[in-house]
Amino acid sequence: MYSNHHHRQKITVTDEIKLRQLTVDEALFRLDQYLHDAFMAGLIQVRVVHGKGTGTLRQAVQKVLAEHPLVKSYRIGGYGEGGTGVTVVQLADK
């Protein structure tokens, strides 16, 4: 007899994703997956930590956020939030 032992793992999604030290391609791939998971988990606001560096990753991240269907708005982190090394993202309503 065949029995299906599929245990669905509950994915816990934190309100922050760290993308520092990844290539732009790796970072954007992870970001897309993360936004989907965060949206499905019902999160309203998340932090994308891309670091300050040259700004290349921040620009790539924000270009994706500007066109992403699950993103309502985004802004650079304020004082005490990570400043230009962090983008704070408001997710779309379910």
Image: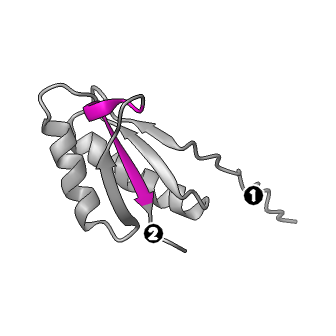
Numbered circle sitting on residue 6: 1
Q: Nearer the viewer, mark 1 or mark 2?
A: 2
Q: Residue at x 36, y 49 (%)?
A: 31
Q: Nearer the viewer, residue 88 or 41?
A: 88
Q: Is residue 23 above or below residue 4?
A: above
In three-dimensional space, the C-alpha distance between marks 1 and 2, rounded to whole angstroms, equals 31 Å
Q: Is residue 69 above or below residue 81?
A: below
Q: Residue at x 72, y 56 (%)?
A: 8
Q: Mark 1 vs mark 2: which is more N-terminal? A: 1
- Total label count? 2
Q: Residue furthest bottom?
A: 94
Q: Is residue 38 above or below residue 93?
A: above
Which residues are the magenta region?
81-90
Q: State yes or no: residue 63 in magenta.
A: no
Q: Nearer the viewer, residue 19 or 51?
A: 51
Does residue 72 appear to the left or right of 28 in the view shown?
A: right
The residue that mark 2 highlights is 92
Numbered circle sitting on residue 21: none
Where disc 2 sits, the SS reads loop
Q: Residue at x 84, y 63 (%)?
A: 3
Q: How busy is the neighbourhood of tag 1: few (under 14 within 10 Å), some, or many (20 plus)?
A: few
Q: Nearer the viewer, residue 75 or 15?
A: 75
Q: How busy is the neighbourhood of tag 2: few (under 14 within 10 Å), some, or many (20 plus)?
A: some
Q: Tell me the kind of residue under disc 1.
A: His
Q: Residue at x 22, y 44 (%)?
A: 25
Query: How far across and how far down the image is residue 46, in percent?
Result: 47, 48
Query: How far across and how far down the image is residue 71, in percent?
Result: 37, 64
Q: Tell me the kind of residue under disc 2.
A: Ala
Where disc 1 sits, the SS reads loop
Where the N terminus falls, by quadrant? bottom right
Query: How far across and how far down the image is residue 22, in percent?
Result: 27, 31
